[in-house]
Image (spheres, rainbow, N blue to C red):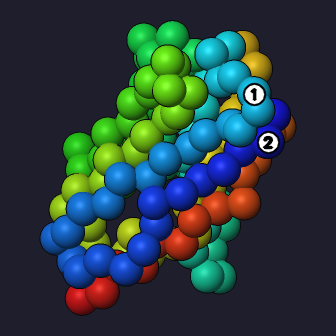
Amino acid sequence: VQLQASGGGLVQAGGSLRLSCSAPGATLDNYAVAWFRQAPGKEREGVSGISSSGGHTYYGDFLQGRFTISRDNSANKVYLQMNSLKPEDTAVYYCAADLGGAGTIYVDEYDDWGRGTLVTVSS
């Protein structure tokens, strides 16, 4: 499935953004979806994931409750609400899908990836 991530931009520290992941021409109903991010010079890391039903969610330990993942299967979208943003959250954020997966945040579990959306948090 081809994915599109959107909603990135420039925000001041302490601000909020909401990222969206969609799959034009396809349905995400049976896919677990996760968000990953990659900052310059760093490895890609898992941010948050959600199971196909939305019943299970996973978060990176570093988030400390600042982000929330959700999905609206009727709209065919998965969202990442990011609050209390910090400069260290600056990265390209990618969404990825795993058919029938659990929604965990391990890179190797995901086969389908979107192009990413840049989030820049200024201090």
* Residue 100, above or below 20: above
Q: Badge 2, how many Cα within 10 Å: few under 14, some, many 20+?
A: some
Residue 68 lies in quadrant: top left
Q: Which residue is mark 2?
A: 2
* Residue 56, above or below 24: above
For the residues carrying marks 1 and 2, which lies nearer the camera in this image? 1
Question: Where's the C terminus, which quadrant?
Answer: bottom left
Q: CA distance from mark 1 to mark 2?
A: 8 Å
Is residue 86 found left or right of 109 in the rendered image? left
SS at badge 2: loop
Q: Nearer the viewer, residue 37 or 81?
A: 81
Mark 2 and mark 1 in contact (Cβ < 8 Å)?
A: yes
Is residue 31 found left or right of 1 in the rendered image? left
Q: Amino acid at mark 2?
A: Gln
Residue pictured at 71% horizontal, 38% vertical:
24
Is residue 39 found left or right of 57 in the rendered image? right
* Residue 38, above or below 68: below
Residue 120 position in % (x across, y down): 42, 79
Residue 109 lies in quadrant: top right
Question: Where's the N terminus, which quadrant?
Answer: top right
Q: Badge 1, how many Cα within 10 Å: few under 14, some, many 20+?
A: few
SS at badge 1: loop
Residue pictured at 53% horizontal, 57% vertical:
6
Is residue 42 found left or right of 53 in the rendered image? right
Residue 76 position in % (x across, y down): 56, 27
Q: Nearer the viewer, residue 18 or 42?
A: 18
Q: Which residue is mark 1?
A: 26
Residue pictured at 60% horizontal, 32% vertical:
33
Q: Amino acid at mark 1?
A: Ala
Residue pictured at 44% horizontal, 52% vertical:
19
Q: Earlier in the sequence, mark 1 or mark 2?
A: 2
For the question of whether residue 87 can be seen, the reply is: no
